[in-house]
Amino acid sequence: MGSITLFTFVSAAFISGFAAAQPTRAINSDFADPCVIQVGDGYYAFATAGNGVNVQVASSSDFSTWDLLSGTDAMPGPFPSWVASSPAIWAPDVNQRDDGTFVMYFSAATSQDSSKHCVGAATSSSITGPYTPENDPLACPLDQGGAIDADGYKDGDTYYVVYKIDGNSLDGDGTTHATPIMLQGLNSDAVTPNGDATQLLDRDSNDGPLIEAPSLANVGGTYYLSFSSNMYNTLNYDVSYATASAIAGPYTKAQAPGAPLLVSGDASDAGNLGGPGGADFNADGSKIVFHAFENGQNLDNGRAMYVADISASNNVLSVG
């Protein structure tokens, strides 16, 4: 996972805290599936379980230099009964609600089947937590493989969350299952589903066995839905995107040469990227955070967090 803060983006003119023509490594340790949120003059990033905590936290005053808040667990528990005893939290996404409080969308292993994850929500009065999970999952289609990589978004006065149905968790049966990206409307509390989820996108032959890690932004009236395709533990993993004129679509996947946005071999300040993915837009659509292999080749040393400026023009995203 896949995430974004709860604001609508209305301008194609971006204001950047720093100028970067290529991605910059921000956290040089395992900090996978990052999200980013700006609170006041500072930025916070949250990541998949690692370094001894369920949800990792990092902070920055300028989006360029980041500090890992070692030992801080944004969601230490206890967890509700639907979560497995070993929660295995993936891809948190933190957003600020209208009342100033915060909601975190996350994926957790389920007590019914710990091999599958479902999407939950948790709330806190403090950006760094602790976050208290809701009693019931937000999306839990276990018969389709579960749900992961939730990302919050606010369009006008309506809260949404996008997520992936984790069909590839069923692939052991010899079938390649669908991995659709879904859009779920939420009530004004930003944690309660409102109506049925809508499918936005699914994999095609160019995506390998899956797409995942969605994030939404609106720039100049165009909705950009970023996603990763192929397997996260390979150099084929990437960051791509699709565009639409309405939040519920239809979405059109961007094609070469304008996509993917990030692939293995792209330059960064720490050498060529390996397996970039799990990207998240910031609030005004001008920046992203994402992960890539720390050693540039494989998962052996985990996935480091990178940051980058991005721009949008004529339905095309570019770095820098």
Image: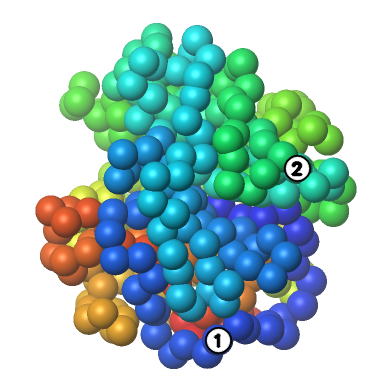
User: Observer-nearest residue: 218 or 316?
Assistant: 218
Q: Which x, y percent locates residue 118? A: 47, 26
Query: Is residue 99 at all visible to an observer of this figure?
Result: yes
Horizontal arrangement in the rendering, residue 20 relative to residue 130 (left or right): left
Label 2 – label 1 distance at C-alpha = 28 Å
Q: Position of residue 95 (x, y in %)?
A: 66, 49
- From the viewer's perspective, tell me whether residue 311 is left or right of residue 218: left
Q: Nearer the viewer, residue 185 or 302?
A: 302
Labelled pair 2, 1 in contact (Cβ < 8 Å)? no
- Residue at image x 45%, y 69%? 66
Residue type at the position of mark 2: Thr
Res 263 → quadrant: bottom left
The three-letter code of the residue at mark 1 reads Phe
* Residue 137 at x, y percent in the picture: 57, 21
Question: Is label 1 in a helix, a strand or a loop?
Answer: loop
Per the image, the residue denoted by label 2 is: 101
Placement of 89 over or under 317, stated as above or below: above
Residue topped by disc 1? 18
Element type at mark 2? loop
Residue 213, placed above or below residue 81? below
Give the residue displayed 51% in from the left and 34% down from the top.
75
Q: Is residue 275 visible?
A: no
Q: Residue at x 68, y 83 (%)?
A: 14
Sequence order check: which comes first, mark 2 or mark 1?
A: 1
